[in-house]
């Protein structure tokens, strides 16, 4: 029986053996964000024009101009704020997630399109990691097409579950339970730790749901399941029977994520001058994006490896055996036919 550590290592190996998937998903990420980056650049360029503020902005951060731009910004321009610089973007996203803060509609639209693309590619990615051998473009996209509509049905269930958690459970925890807990508290530290405890509790619920939905996709692909409710039931059974291994593997994958996060926090660029500094900051940012994608793919690959090892689905990854034709000498040995 495979241990979580073996599955974790096997997942990393499978991801590293298929660099085209990582490169492809990075390309998809860039292509989704590029049009909006160009549009935002146009808005900034139009607002700056050839003014003295343009020269000041090129030399560093001009907060006076930035506040002026933010005051009149609409649409995509409202996302251009100081929190997008370096590691601040990560903290801003984390804060928005923990506090369930609404995002601008344009960002939600981009995120929705990006999610749909991930849903499309998920079947092909999991299939590639499950087979642990090259499937070529035709095999990869065939798997993407087969599981796309199945995963669309699953995404409806996921949307209902996560919608309930963020629209019902989160407000209940932080608008009702939290005020009730701290109603007689006079020490600020106690109130802080109470809020952190609720963050941890909510995060654990999200993590459990994430694990179940991940193994639903894994079982759907490896076992070629058509019913997503059936795959989800099977995933629940697998997670319950192998809870310790599943949890250990998930924590190991989360450790990779925290490692990538820590590395980016150490080298994340701040605001600098135009020129080489900008390109260095861009390169570091893209390296972080690649690291995040690599970690996400490792989650899937390691979960596939654990599932296959625990339920003896190793035959799925076995390559077709080559059968070599008999040599002409075989006819002589066998005699006349």
Image (tube, helix red, strand yellow):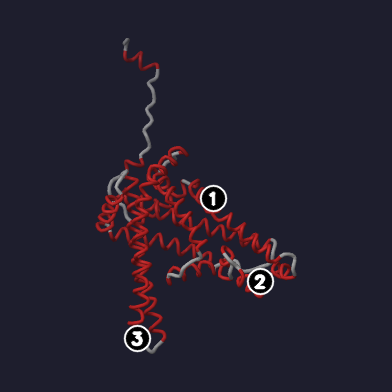
Q: Residue at x 43, y 72 (%)?
A: 99
- Using the rendered view, name the quadrant where residue 35 is placed: bottom right
x, y percent for residue 326: 37, 21
Left or right, 263 with reference to 247: right
Earlier sequence position, callout 2 versus callout 3: 2
Earlier sequence position, callout 1 versus callout 3: 1
Earlier sequence position, callout 1 versus callout 2: 1
Q: Is residue 331 above or below residue 284?
A: above
Location of mark 3 (residue) = 183
- Using the rendered view, name the quadrant where residue 81 is placed: bottom right
Q: Residue furthest bottom?
A: 186
Q: Are marks 1 and 3 in contact (CB under 8 Å)?
A: no
Location of mark 2 (residue) = 61
Q: CA distance from mark 2 to mark 3?
A: 43 Å
Mark 2, mark 3: which one is toward the viewer?
3
Left or right, 296 with reference to 158: right
Q: Dot 1: what SS?
A: helix
x, y percent for residue 329: 38, 16
Q: CA distance from mark 1 to mark 2?
A: 30 Å
Q: Residue at x 25, y 58 (%)?
A: 240
x, y percent for residue 40: 61, 61
Q: CA distance from mark 1 to mark 3?
A: 50 Å
């Amino acid at each position: 029986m495979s241990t979580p550590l073996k599955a974790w290592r096997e997942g990393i190996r499978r991801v590293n053996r298929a660099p085209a998937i990582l490169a492809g998903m990075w390309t998809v990420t860039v292509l989704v964000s590029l049009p909006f980056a160009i549009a935002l650049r146009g808005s900034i360029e139009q607002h700056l024009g050839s003014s003295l503020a343009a020269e000041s902005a090129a030399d560093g951060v001009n907060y006076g101009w930035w506040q002026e731009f933010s005051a009149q910004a609409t649409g995509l321009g409202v996302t251009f704020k100081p929190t997008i610089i370096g590691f601040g973007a990560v903290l801003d996203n984390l804060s928005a997630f923990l506090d369930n803060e609404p995002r601008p509609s344009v960002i939600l639209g981009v995120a929705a399109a990006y999610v749909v693309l991930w849903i499309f590619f998920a079947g092909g990615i999991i299939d590639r990691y499950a087979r642990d051998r090259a499937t070529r473009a035709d095999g990869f996209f065939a798997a993407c097409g087969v599981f796309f509509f199945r995963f669309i049905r699953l995404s409806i269930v996921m949307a209902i579950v996560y919608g309930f958690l963020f629209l019902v459970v989160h407000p209940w925890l932080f608008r009702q339970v939290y005020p009730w807990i701290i109603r007689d508290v006079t020490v600020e530290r106690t109130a802080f730790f109470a809020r952190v405890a609720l963050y941890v509790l909510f995060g654990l619920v999200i993590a459990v749901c994430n694990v179940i939905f991940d193994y639903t996709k894994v079982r759907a692909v490896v076992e070629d399941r058509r019913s997503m409710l059936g795959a989800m039931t099977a995933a629940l059974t697998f997670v319950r029977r192998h809870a310790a291994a599943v949890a250990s593997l998930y924590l190991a994958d989360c450790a990779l994520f925290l490692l990538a996060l820590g590395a980016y926090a150490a080298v994340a660029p701040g605001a600098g001058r135009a020129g080489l500094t900008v390109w260095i900051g861009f390169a570091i940012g893209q390296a972080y994006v690649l690291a995040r994608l690599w970690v996400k793919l490792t989650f899937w690959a390691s979960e596939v490896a654990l599932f296959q090892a625990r339920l003896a689905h190793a035959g799925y990854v076995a390559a077709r055996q080559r059968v070599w034709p008999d040599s002409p000498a075989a006819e002589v040995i066998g005699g006349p036919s």
